[in-house]
Image (cartoon, coloured by chain):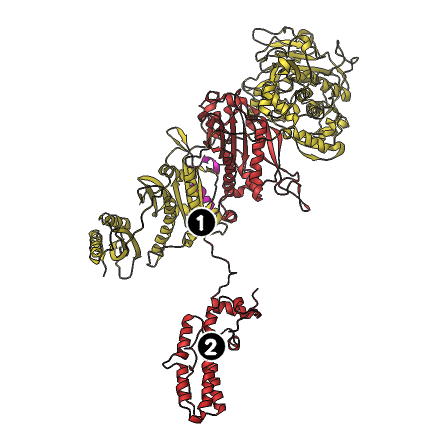
Chain colours: A red, B yellow
Amino acid sequence: MRSKSPPCLSEERRDKDGAPAFQLAARNVAYTVSKLTDYSAGALERASAELFSALGEEASAVKNEADWKVFRDRWMARKNGVLTQVNELWLKAAPREAKREVGQVVNRVKEQVEQKIKGAKDWLDAPSLEIMHPGYTVSAEELEKYRFEKIGSVDITLPGIRRPIGAEHPVVKTTNEMVRVFQKLGYSVAEGPVVETDYYNFESLNFPPNHPARDTQDTLFIAGQQAKPQRERLLLRTHTSPVQIRTMEKMRPPLRIVIPGTVHRNDPPDASHSPMFHQIEGLAVDSNITFGDLKGTLDHAMKEFFGSSVKTSFRPSFFPFTEPSAEMYVSCFICGGSGRRGSDPCRPCKQTGWIEILGCGMVDPNVFEFVKDNGYDPRKVSGFAFGMGADRIALLKYGVDDIQLFFQGDVRFLRQWA
Amino acid sequence: MKISPQWVREFVQLSVDDRRLAEDLTGVGIGVEGISGSGADAVFEMEIGTNRPDAMNHYGVAREAAAIYDLPLKELSGLRLPASGVAGAKAQSSVKGVYAAPKRRSSTGHGRAGKKTSAPKAASSRTSHGTTEVVPFPGVASSGVVSSKSSEREIFPITVEEPELCPRFSARVIRGTTIKPSPEKIAHRLKLLDQRPISNAVDATNYVLWEMGKPTHVFDMDLLEGGRLVIRHAKNGEKLKTLDGVERTLSSDDLVVADAKKAVGLAGVMGGYDTMITDKTKNIVIESAWWDPGTVRKMSRRHGIHTDASHRFERGADFESTVLSCDLVAALILESGGGELSGGAIDAVSRQMDQAPIVLRLSEVHRILGGNLSTGEIFRILKKLGFGLIPEGQADAQIRVQIPSWRLDVEREIDVIEEIARLHGYDKFENSLPAYSGAVVDLPHAAMDATLRERALALGYNEAVSLTFISHAAAETFSSGAGVLELENPLSEEASVMRTSLAPGMLDMLAWNLNRDAEDVRLFEMGRVYEMRDGERVEPARACLGATLAAVKNGLPMGGVLDVSKGEHAAAAEVFRLFKGDLETLLAAFAYRELSFDRQTAEYFHPGRSARALMDGAVVAQFGQLAEEVKAERKLRQDVFLAEIDLDVLRGQGLRQVRFAPLGKYPAVERDFSFVFSDDVEFEAMRRAVMGLGISELREFKPVEIFRGGSIGAGKYSILVRARLQSDEATLRDEQIAACAEKIVGALKGMGGSQRA
């Protein structure tokens, strides 16, 4: 700890606490060596005291190397240095009988001057207080003075000036993180259009025309499509699942894709709904994919995303394009599955300890029928698909209480991710 | 939807408490979202998938519970119609458990053993006690009209003109009953489910609906003109006042139940007001039919009526429960209001809905589900759910599965496999990770998009995501010239068109911030816009930068101020340069030979402070200050800057690939030249002229200081330019430098510049 003090922090120095920087020029009258007329012990004492006072004052004003050189030269220079003058004016001018005594005074002066000059240099060169002053306890005041005067230290507690790096959007960030988890599992990113046809959004995903399951999708339709056959009519995709078919049309099995994308539904905006939101879809097709693979893959992915301590649970559900279908829950990553946060109920999981994260299932054979010609014979291949809401996961992950905040561009909100 | 666990317990002897029951039901997909109340008044809030209308009632839930806990399920035969009190009754002294699981009608040799029917079979009729008798309908004419058979006609004549859409219509007649409030037990249960008790007759239909899921309807028989019912298409323009009191105009697409004169009910959706049960009602006709799901759905949508009945008919009601449901309703009415049954059950059946048995291969069960399901477990689950099983092939490798009539959702082998997985419990399947032999490929533009995004973030732009909808007005202002995509059913006029540009969304976001006293705002968005080009929809990728004046000014001018003259004009020039620099930094990540700028920007940009960037000749961006008019129109409190970037162009260019350039060995020298030019000479012209001199040692030519005013005359400006010269071969000698300088001065003079001393 910093509790040491330098020996060169002489009495003079400490007495002049807070003195401004080197100020030879600022002194009203610079010290000059006076001629001696009286060689009595008292007179010698007064003259040397005056000299020592000036010496101490000037030594303590030394703040840097340049100061020190000026200081050194002023006192030590052979030509007209203070010591030279003392030699001339005091010793040489002294009467023979006083020479012995004057000589002793001059020697003391010389000793003091050399010591001060060396001391001032040591002060400048001192690497730290501790090294120089074992066993010396330094006051806080001394420490501050030392910092400011000696090292030119600054107030390191003032806030830093930050270069304003932009903040990642929480939904994009969440999407990217989730996509990366699946990329590591061998999934390639795929994408497709937002404005979709009825065929890709519904028909090929086993939503027959006029099927009630279509009602749950709250579809937004593009105007002026009535003249077209139903399967060609345009709408805003209600899920990223159409990309499953689009990709299977282009690529033969085995297939592993992850599909991030924007989707729309006719949901009036409120704290938990937005007519535009984001999904992350996944599809794996191979000759040997089982329901256990679906569970194992998603369990692994959730542990990777939320942390290795989360557990997953699957419950039956219904989606036209998967069968069996499931909803996957993860143990609440806020309360750890206890349903409580301290003495308060855990709101994100509604005290159940579980949070619904995604819908999934084994690809329905009817879906494969639509791409059978590209190698997806439902008798030979099987697969699983899953889809989750990126916005919802971001809401949960960051504890955001209103989905609208994601789409307002409010910097007070966005900068929280900076 | 609400379910009373107490009511469920009437059908299955459960030992678990309500909470556990809720959890276990949820575990098999009969979702219980919440429990309210307790004891006999406990109510489950249910979430049941659209494919499971069979479970949207208490008996259906009880069936699932019986399967979960492997408990017996009571037959739904609790009612016994009093034999003695039936006028004209013949044999129907009781209604047997036609609804018990599994119900087989194999004794008659028809039905499930036959193949799946899609066309009407021979018209049939059945007696009220559930055995089936297939007889040709007397009323079946070449027109396809089906009438109830003669013995039934005596009770109440029914004519089905549309047997395709109404393959089964059952009815019961009650005479001499009294309409009054329901008994307390009935009323209490309905209230638990948030149903309003009305009268014993109406409540009976509602009670039966919630008890076993089949919607029924009751008519005041005396208000049915002509004493008969006809199932027919409505006439165009025909009127029907429905139970909700709304007078509806029907079309020939609507299917109605009618009496001799008028429509008295919208088939499967809602009954008619004029024939409803009132305090005065004495005689009642109970209707329980099976309606074509698609027809009900269309009518429900067309008339905007969604009822508990339409909800179930749309999803497929139980074909076999029409008579039973009539009887259950009849029993409730008789019990509370007295009266007597008039004759037996009427049951007009024009075709069977029997599903063909499904072949289930155990190998397929294991191929899809993996895991270690035993054959015994598979059999147990299916039997409990009411499926009939007939093992086939060697060693039970294949089973013929007969589907219960209430499970219209089970049509295929995979549906049966799902039932097995569901009841086995998803969480019991072991997790596994599949091996994979494919390759992982990135989208071709992934790295480019990521680079652009990283740079925008590094420049201090916050990533934003705005809504994809804009208003018609915005679509017009920010039109690219291409066709727009309008929504058929927009949420509002403000959100009625797919965005044609990221600019309006960006301006909304900037305004949002400025209106909340956030002044230092930098945002960027990457996303698609939506257009029609040549009749095809396209979704070009765009990026957009947006910044407030305050934010742009805050940008640290790394190279220092260029225009040192005082006044607003010089400040604007500096601000423009700051914003342009951000754009240049983004673009610099991409490969191009030439980046040039001109003034051709859209009208929503400031005419003098905006530019278009061309990358190797292709328009890659337009950017600059927003036009004053647009700023005023949008009530923006500050000048704002926009840059719209065509991501598709950038994706076409590709990322810049670094090729190392050797570091110069010899010192570079800089020479400054001070000139006065007329305002119409832009720097780019000077740069081109000087670079065009072909001076091989010229490494850089840039402006250092600009000044207007003072001793410089109006319409002119002084500019200090700096040339950096360096040779790869040797240190440049003074005369070489002088020669270069002379050429540069000459070029600048040639452009009308006058050199200052």
Residue B284 seen in the current view? no
Q: Residue at x 39, y 81 (%)?
A: A81
In the image: residue B566, left or right of residue B518: left
Residue B599 vs A135, above or below: the answer is above
Relative to residue A19, is residue A47 depicted above or below?
Answer: below
Q: State the residue in front, A31 or A45.
A: A45
Residue B81 horizontal side relative to residue A169, left or right: right
Q: Position of residue B628 (x, y in %)?
A: 38, 48
Q: Which residue is mark 2?
A: A116
Give the quarter of the image for residue B314. Answer: top right
x, y percent for residue A359? 57, 31
C-alpha gap between disc 2 and disc 1: 54 Å
The location of residue A418, given as percent across then percent down, is 50, 49
B404 in magenta? no
First to last magenta residue range: B491-509
The three-letter code of the residue at mark 2 reads: Lys
Q: What amino acid is at disc 1? A: Gly
Is B502 within the magenta? Answer: yes
Identify the mark at residue B460; answer none if there is no mark. Answer: 1
Neighbourhood count class around disc 2 (C-alpha, 10 Å): few under 14, some 14–19, many 20 upward? many
Q: Position of residue B196 (x, y in %)?
A: 70, 29
Residue under mark 1: which chain is it in? Answer: B
